Image: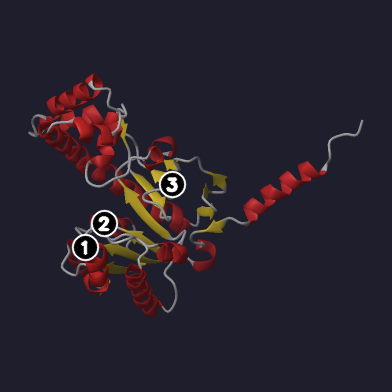
Amino acid sequence: MQGAPRFKTTSLRAYKRKEVVMQQLIYDSVKSGQRMTIVCFVSGSGTNYRKIVERNPEHDYLVFTNRPDCGGVAIARENKHEVIALSHVPYLEEARKKYGSGKIPRNCPERVQYEQQISRLIENKYGRQTDLICLAGYDQWNSDWLVDKYFPRLLNVHPGDTTKGYDGLHGVPSAKAILAGDTTVRSTLFIVDKGEDTGPVLVQSKPLDIKQTLEKLESRGTTGLLEGLKRVTDFATECNITTYKGFTEKASNELMVMMARVCSSLQDTLKVKGDWAIYPFAVHGLIGQGRVAVSGRSVYIDGKKMPEHGYRLDEHR
């Protein structure tokens, strides 16, 4: 009887070698040095941008904003970083008339045209593509065009565990975690892809204990949080609700307000202990040191393939 064909083993080895060869460093610190060109996109307070700079101010920073009067611009002036401002309003005016306010498609031609102009302005500044783009509280959708152009050098942070589908704005990610029965919440730093908070995960924060966090907040004078959490979870248990959609369909306005207050408090804390920890670490402790490579949707740190949840601070530090 003929033995198993040897080409299968060879093929597997060849595949593994090919995967290694196809790994793309996000930034090659050996080839390019320790000084990166980093563009931070800001629309609001700019605190994520501030924390990135505080970790290592020795890089070449540029701030882009679609809202010239936002807090991030004031921080850029303090840091003496150049600001490129380009309002999205004129570019999306026709799309707003066509589709309605708040309903402009992610990949409409007007949005792509706007991003192409942003890219031209950035490249005119550097004479080439930037090494890294950090979305630091940027309030516009990214089109597929922008992702195709900059992947995997386009980063974003989210106050929730994106591997569990805890997406959404404001307190929604924490609400989804609570309703799913989680006792902790995490922030996630990911490479932006063509989905909504679905990109390959680079870093996750240490877990933030929900009840302990609310207890600390109450000890500092923010009352009613633990009672609000109990009423929300009791209602969810009684009605067999495990999803945010199910909660919004059945909960009273009073319970919705309670949930929003609890989750807003959680996410304010998570921003400080989560977002502000993982964004600077990812940019400077990992990418800037030439430690991060990508092959397709797989992330490698120091040559080791990361699990779906990426590099967790509580597991490595």
State the CA–CA distance, disc 2 to disc 3: 18 Å
Asked which secondary structure carries label 2, the reply is loop
Q: Kindly identify the amino acid type of the residue bearing the numbered disc 2.
A: Gly
The residue at the point 12 percent across, 36 percent down is: 257
Q: Name the residue under label 3.
A: 201
130 shown above or below 160: below
Mark toward the start of the polypeptide (1 vs 2): 1
Screen quadrant of the C terminus: top left
The residue at the point 63 percent across, 52 percent down is: 20
State the CA–CA distance, disc 1 to disc 3: 25 Å
State the CA–CA distance, disc 1 to disc 2: 9 Å
Is residue 174 toward the left or the right of residue 280 in the image?
left
Q: Kindly identify the amino acid type of the residue bearing the numbered disc 1.
A: Gly
The residue at the point 53 percent across, 58 percent down is: 25
Image location (x, y in percent) of residue 232: 18, 27
Q: Mark 1 points at which residue?
A: 72
Q: Mark 2 points at which residue?
A: 137
Image location (x, y in percent) of residue 127: 42, 79
